[in-house]
Amino acid sequence: MPKKKKQEPYPLPNELIPGDWFARLTREEVFNDDKPIEIDLGCGDGSFLIRMAEHYSDRNFLGVERLLGRIRKVSRKLSHAELTNAKALRIDSNYAVNELLPHGFASRIHFLCPDPWPKKKHARRRQMCQLHFLKALHSLLEENGELLFMTDDLPYYEEALEAQRKCDFFEPLLWKEGEFFYPKTDFEEQWVAQGKSMNRLRLRKR
């Protein structure tokens, strides 16, 4: 007779489960301390999130991901690494940004290697090119907070630059590779190995 698979606890210690999915969270419900909070929007397998949390122990990190399998994997990794300054939230990014996450609570938002939606008919799904999405990200940032965007897709990057030029609520900053500790995401590692280059955009809240 096959052994029964051990039941995994739910939620895992590093999973953030809102008490009310239809009300905006408070900062204290996300992290109940005064450390700066950074968001990894679309955290994938959690590689970037974990390395950042390990390196910056004086900061808190929230990984947002809509896929259950990924978020459980990230939560297990965080638990095994005994990281108390990082949590994972399973939810769609649009809903998290527009409806759930607290206003003015994040010092940085990392939006790295999102789906570029290369087909013309899907262009409206490129979130970094939508002013209403940029405004929603802006509202989550504290004063002088930063939005860091990265993609290997040049057309998406150029379109995001054009959208940024049309808005007056972000100020562009220089972002040189190696300027500060910034580990590669799982997608970035794959693409760099294929000889692709990354396009970076760093914005500060006005």
Image: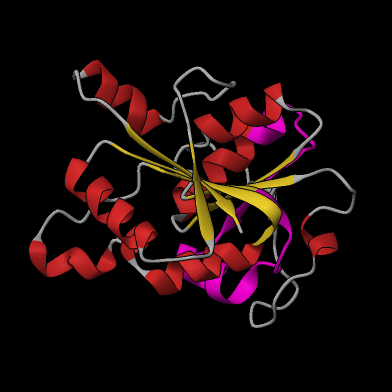
Q: Residue at (21%, 24%) from the top-left corner?
A: 196
| 165 vs 35, nearest the viewer | 165
Q: Residue at (20%, 41%) from the top-left corner?
A: 154
Q: Quadrant of residue 23?
A: bottom right
> For the view shown, which residue lies furthest in the bottom direction?
22
In reply to whether residue 135 is colored magenta, the answer given is no
Taking the image as drawn, is residue 148 in sight? yes
Position in image of residue 160 (x %, y %): 31, 54
| 179 vs 22, nearest the viewer | 179
| 163 vs 1, nearest the viewer | 163
Against 84, residue 105 (above or below) is: below
Split into 4 quadrants, where in the image is the C terminus? bottom right
Colour convention of the picture: secondary structure
How many circles with numbers are drawn on the protein? 0
> For the view shown, which residue lies furthest in the right direction?
33
Left or right: 69, with 160 as reference point: right
Position in image of residue 159 (x %, y %): 24, 55
Against 112, residue 80 (above or below) is: above
Q: Residue at (88%, 54%) from the top-left corner?
A: 32
- What are the residue bounds of the magenta stretch? 78-107
Q: Residue at (43%, 30%) from the top-left corner?
A: 185
Taking the image as drawn, is residue 92 in sight? no
